[in-house]
């Protein structure tokens, strides 16, 4: 009798363990596999092998919730039994923005480029992955964008589009560079220049340097004599990064007016309490030969030879 009692106890414990950890062998399988999906969605199935997500199907020995259509849309048995309907499947077109974001981050959260996505300007403006990316009908094979990148960004940033139409601009419209070369649309930490007041969407390097220095490497330094405006305030102190009516993307049409915005003798800050030094008395701004400051101060971004950035 005690032997039967012990056996009954063991069966009860195993049943409880099986229920608690989902180990029931007779549980219905709610995943139907991607081959069933193509019966109703042949247009998506035919183009899906060219999709970056297709590689997840080819990975062997993966559970069904991580592969194929059901990896994103969830179990499909109820959807098949009901013969379709958005209420029986995870349809991104009816998801809330938070649900859509969380669904994508289930796989993409481990990418370091997306660590700031929940605090990004896009997410805070209720823009989620499906607003820019099209998984089934992507216009670009890379990144699965819904449109070409410039058209996609211009759809919201119309003021930037007009800047790239100016006489002097970065060649984004020509395809030489693109927005994501300087910006991280998934969010970026606050940069180290301009007292961290620049937008969080600006791409930064590991040491916090500006994206401008990825191309303009001769301005990177470090220099023995740094130009404070460049090192602390950043390139945007003097330049309009998207486009300008002035040569070299300057904010002012004449060089000396750009320099005199700071070099006016005002203030008593700095380690020596001298503020920003003004030009000497020998510099007569009425004389045209003194108006092009960079004729003499050629190393304006920093110098290893002269504290006045002379030759």
Image (tube, grey):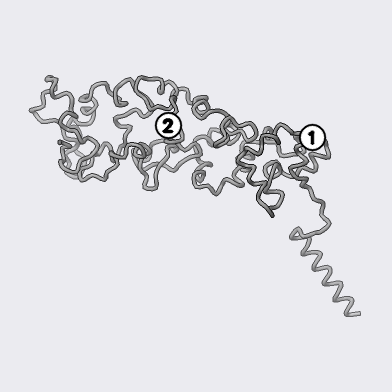
The residue under the point 33% across, 32% down is: 236
Please state which of residues 87 and 301 is positioned toward the viewer in this rendering. Answer: 301
Please state which of residues 11 and 70 is positioned toward the viewer in this rendering. Answer: 70
Q: Secondary structure at mark 1?
A: loop
Q: Which residue is mark 2?
A: 177
The residue under the point 16% across, 35% down is: 277
In x, y percent, where is residue 222? 26, 45
Residue 33, by quadrant, is top right
43 with respect to 108 (left or right):
right
- Seen in the picture, residue 284 relative to 37 is either above or below; the reply is above
Q: Which residue is mark 1?
A: 84
The residue under the point 51% across, 46% down is: 115
Q: Quick check: marks 2 and 1 in contact, CB under 8 Å?
A: no
In x, y percent, where is residue 156? 51, 26
Q: Quadrant of the N terminus?
A: bottom right
- Seen in the picture, residue 51 relative to 31 is either above or below; the reply is above
154 with respect to 289 (left or right):
right
The tally of labels here is 2
Callout 1 crowding tier (Cα within 10 Å): few <14, some 14–19, many ≥20:
few
**Which sits earlier in the primary sequence, circle 2 or circle 1?**
1
In x, y percent, where is residue 307? 16, 40
Q: Nearer the viewer, mark 2 or mark 1?
A: 2
Residue 11, by quadrant, is bottom right
Q: Secondary structure at mark 2?
A: loop
Q: Quadrant of the C terminus?
A: top left
The residue under the point 81% across, 59% down is: 25
Callout 2 crowding tier (Cα within 10 Å): few <14, some 14–19, many ≥20:
few
């Amino acid at each position: 009798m005690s032997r039967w009692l012990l056996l009954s106890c063991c069966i009860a414990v195993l049943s409880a363990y099986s229920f608690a950890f989902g180990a029931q062998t007779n549980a219905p399988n709610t995943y139907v596999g991607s081959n069933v999906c193509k019966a109703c969605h042949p247009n998506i199935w035919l183009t899906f092998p060219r999709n970056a997500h297709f590689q997840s199907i080819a990975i062997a020995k993966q559970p069904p919730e991580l592969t194929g259509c059901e990896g994103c849309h969830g179990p499909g048995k109820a959807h098949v039994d009901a013969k379709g309907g958005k209420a029986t499947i995870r349809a991104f077109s009816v998801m809330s923005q938070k649900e859509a974001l969380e669904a994508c981050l289930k796989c993409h959260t481990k990418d370091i480029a997306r660590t700031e996505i929940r605090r990004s300007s896009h997410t805070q403006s209720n823009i989620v992955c499906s607003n820019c990316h099209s998984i089934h009908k992507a216009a670009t094979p890379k990144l699965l964008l819904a449109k070409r990148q410039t058209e996609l960004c211009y759809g919201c940033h119309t003021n930037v589009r007009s800047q790239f139409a100016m006489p002097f601009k970065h060649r984004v419209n020509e395809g030489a560079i693109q927005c994501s070369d300087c910006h991280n649309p998934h969010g970026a930490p606050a940069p180290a220049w301009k007292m961290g007041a620049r937008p969080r969407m600006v791409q930064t390097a590991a040491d916090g340097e500006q994206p401008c220095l990825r191309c303009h490497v001769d301005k990177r330094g470090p220099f023995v004599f740094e130009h404070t405006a460049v090192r602390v305030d950043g390139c945007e102190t003097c330049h309009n990064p998207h486009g300008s009516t002035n040569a070299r993307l300057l904010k002012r049409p004449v060089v000396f007016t750009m320099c005199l915005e700071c070099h006016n003798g005002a203030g008593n800050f700095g380690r020596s309490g001298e503020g920003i030094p003004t030009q000497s008395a020998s510099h007569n701004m009425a004389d045209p030969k003194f108006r092009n400051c960079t004729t003499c101060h050629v190393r304006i971004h920093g110098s290893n030879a002269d504290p006045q950035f002379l030759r």
